[in-house]
Image (tube, helix red, strand yellow):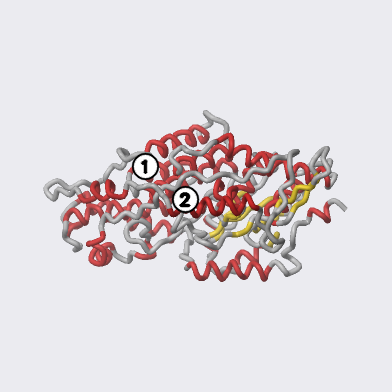
Amino acid sequence: MKKPTHKARVRQTRHTSKPFVYLTHAFLPTLIVFVLMCSETFGQIPVIKTPKPTTFKTIEIGATSQTPNSTPNSRMTEIQRNNQELIRNIELTQKQSSYQKVQELYSDFDNNSISYKLPNLSSLKGTDNFRNALSEINEMLIGKMPLDLKRATFIVENAYFENQLDFAQFEKSIQNAIDICNLKMSEYELNKRTDLAINFTIFDYITDTLSVNLPSQEKELIHYPIKYDFNDYMGAENWSNMFVSKLMATNSGQCHSMPLFYLILAQELGAESYLTFSPNHSFVRFKSENGDWYNAELTCGAIISDAAILESGYVKAEAIKSGIYMDTLSQHETVACLLNTLANSYVHEYGYDSFVKQCTDTVLKYYPNQLNAIMLESNWQTQTTMYIAQQKGKPSPDIFNQDLKAKTEFERMHEIYSQIDALGYEYMPEEHYLKWLKSLEEAKTKPENQKSFIHQMIK
């Protein structure tokens, strides 16, 4: 894929109020205050229990038509209802996690021998799946394996599911969507399948109701739009809500999984499109043959202007200048960013250790201003500093002034905070993000923010 004329590098990590695990500069004016507040909860690493793998919605092209058994307003097929019920059941019957073992590792203090590194969690069951995923993606990044967004997405999600997913089934679900897009382009008589034509067809597939005639059959297949899932859209209760596999199982997703699914389809269909970030959000950009850029906002199903995205009020001029927002990622950069998802998945399952730092180091090796990686590193550094402070058992400034190694970790933590501030990052509260999402619904009615232009193109 050719590099875009402008490049971006980032997606921010989400914040949480849970202590230690996602603590960032926005919540830590000084480390000591936080130690005093939370010393009793040190080591309480939140763990999201690993659900069993979902099943993917499958449509057999050339076989039978998928006709909804529900009312038109519900837009949910029987298969989709079954998949949603399956996920609900999985959430109720999640297997026992490694939480207790993590607690034991963190509580094994020896005040006579201070450890300046977080406990190594690699002995816990399933961590090898994450290390293998990191290794395979690194092989892609250094050119020893083909750069494959579909494969990279699968191995990241499969690591969280303890390698229980079936890649052949994952591919088949992607291929079903590709087949529908190809059939629709044939019906549109798009003999010249330009990047723009392919991108708008993918956009229609995700955001609109598409009906296609099955080849050599007097049957019609209907695909309903992928809905934005406002329920746990940040994966706080179930991290797998962030995944493409969940999107394909339920025909619903959010601003992480929907753009990623779009980009996988674009790669498979041979079109250029790019991942782009704004505060707490990601969307897709692509351009026409004459160089005009389009912002595909999948959450509201409209092609919207830059102004509509900037209306959140949390995009500083410094953030645009540093490239963390409103820019585009190449395919290479997009695959690298999946390591942030891998690291976050590891944190949800086990907690912080050197593996998280390995992931962020790999991303930052290629993209020094990658915001999500820097924020993950910030969380890791904060966790390390708090771990040292807890072992010393003296929540006061003296514990750092009297210990050169501890002081170095403390200062490094604040250096990363300053680095994030310098990039132009500003924390966006969740309620403001939801308000902005609703404003997109209103914005899409404006003349400059339109539905897909595909029908205009084929007239």
Residue at mark 2 to residue at mark 1: CA–CA distance: 27 Å
Q: Which quadrant would the N terminus be assigned to in this image? A: top right
Residue at the extreme front? 69
Left/right placement of residue 248 relative to residue 203 reads: left
Query: Is any atom of residue 364 visible in this view?
Result: no
Residue at point 58%, 48% (across, down): 249
Eyeballing the image, is 169 above or below 289?
A: above
The amino acid on which the numbered mark 2 sits, given as a three-letter code, is Ile
Residue 209 in the image: state x and y as whole percent: 73, 55
The amino acid on which the numbered mark 1 sits, given as a three-letter code, is Phe
Label ID, residue 355: 1
Of pointers 2 and 1, the one earlier in the residue sequence: 2
Q: Quadrant of residue 402?
A: bottom left
Query: What SS does tag 1 mark?
Result: helix
Eyeballing the image, is 62 above or below 340?
A: above
Residue at point 55%, 44% (across, down): 55
Q: Nearer the viewer, residue 368 or 433?
A: 433
Left/right placement of residue 272 relative to residue 139 reads: right
Left/right placement of residue 409 relative to residue 332 reads: left
Q: Nearer the viewer, residue 439 or 92?
A: 92
Instruction: Report the residue marked by disc 2.
Output: 90
Residue 112 in the image: state x and y as whole percent: 11, 48
Q: Nearer the viewer, residue 347 or 13?
A: 347
Residue at point 16%, 58% (across, down): 393
Query: What SS does tag 2 mark?
Result: helix
Q: Residues within 10 Å of mark 1 (few under 14, many from 20)?
A: many
Residue 320 in the image: state x and y as whole percent: 56, 59
Q: Quadrant of residue 356?
A: top left
Label ID, residue 405: none
Residue at the extreme top? 144
